[in-house]
Amino acid sequence: MIEPADFTQDTAEEGGLILRLNGAWTIAGVADADKRLRALGDAVRHIDLSAVEHIDTVGAWIVYRTARDMGADIVGVNANARSLIEAVGGVDSNDSIAPPVISP
């Protein structure tokens, strides 16, 4: 049975926290973990995904957003998770989006 999204905290050698994520970081079970992540502040240095059993685009967005907002590195990530995190991170842009101009 796949466990819902969760995490533990350890102290990094250089100070700050290491978040060790585990379980399934999917839309079905990530809400509670997301609330707890938002409450941590910005003391996180590393986010370790080596124990994540499964991740979908919602989980990837939460990991990306948490790392971005806290200035943390993402470590222990497999190829599938890396591609999802890169994909959702690619849409996080401040570039203005203009509608196409169509000639009459």
Image (cartoon, rainbow, N blue to C red):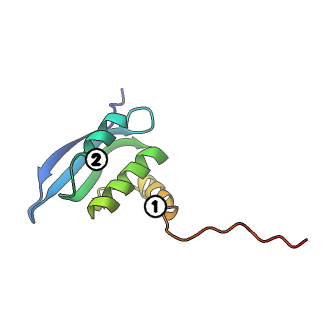
Furthest toward the top, the residue is 1
Question: In the shown orientation, is residue 13 left or right of residue 83?
Answer: left
Q: Which residue is mark 1?
A: 89
Quadrant of the frame with the C terminus: bottom right
Question: In the shown orientation, is residue 70 left or right of residue 1?
Answer: left
Label 2 amino acid? Arg
Asked which quadrant contains residue 24, the reply is top left
Q: Residues within 10 Å of mark 2 (few under 14, many from 20)?
A: some
Pick whichever, 7 or 71, lies toward us: 71
Q: How many marks?
A: 2
Quadrant of the frame with the N terminus: top left
Which residue is depicted at the point 49% across and 66% down?
Answer: 93
Q: Which residue is mark 2?
A: 38
**Residue 79 seen in render:** yes
Asked which quadrant contains residue 74, the reply is bottom left
Pick whichever, 25 or 2, lies toward us: 25
The residue tagged with tag 2: helix, strand or loop? helix
Q: Give x and y (percent) for residue 2.
A: 36, 30
Q: Is residue 58 above or below residue 41?
A: above
The residue tagged with tag 1: helix, strand or loop? helix
Furthest toward the right, the residue is 104
Which residue is depicted at the point 83% across and 70% down?
Answer: 102
Q: Give x and y (percent) for residue 52.
A: 33, 44
Which residue is depicted at the point 12% across and 59% down?
Answer: 12
Q: Give x and y (percent) for residue 48.
A: 26, 53
